[in-house]
Amino acid sequence: MKTISYSAAADKFLAQAAPLERTRIEAAIERYAMTGEGDAIIMEGVPARRMRIGRRWRVVFIETPDQIIVIKVGNRADIYE
């Protein structure tokens, strides 16, 4: 399994999220770290990936061979700003 680390912005969002949503988002990130499964694509113009979690949430992260660095977590309408 790859190591997962969170930026301050991602930590802040998850701390303020509803417990059910936080659990769902963290589980999706952990599943991707263990298996590579998830709706993740390479973003255009930046060295990052975007993972879709349900219809509402997006996670932007950088993936290295042994680590996932979560940069931003948020609503799909706000994540790309």
Image: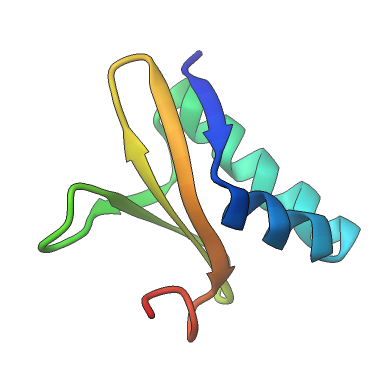
Residue 44 in which image quadrant: bottom left
Question: Which residue is most to the front?
Answer: 8
Residue 66 in percent (x, y) is at: 37, 14
Question: Which residue is most to the bottom?
Answer: 77
Residue 22 in percent (x, y) is at: 77, 54
Residue 9 in which image quadrant: bottom right
In the displayed structure, 3 sits above or below 80; it is: above
Q: Residue at x 55, y 31 (%)?
A: 5
Front residue of this view, candidates 7 and 39: 7
Q: How is the image coloured?
A: rainbow
- Label count reads 0
Front residue of this view, candidates 9 and 69: 9
Front residue of this view, candidates 60 and 29: 60
In the displayed structure, 2 sits above or below 70; it is: above
| Rendered-image quadrant of the C terminus | bottom left
Q: Residue at x 54, y 27 (%)?
A: 4
Q: Residue at x 82, y 64 (%)?
A: 16
Residue 19 in percent (x, y) is at: 89, 57
Question: Which residue is most to the right?
Answer: 19
Residue 73 in percent (x, y) is at: 56, 60
In the displayed structure, 43 sits above or below 65; it is: below
Residue 18 in which image quadrant: bottom right
Q: Residue at x 69, y 62 (%)?
A: 13
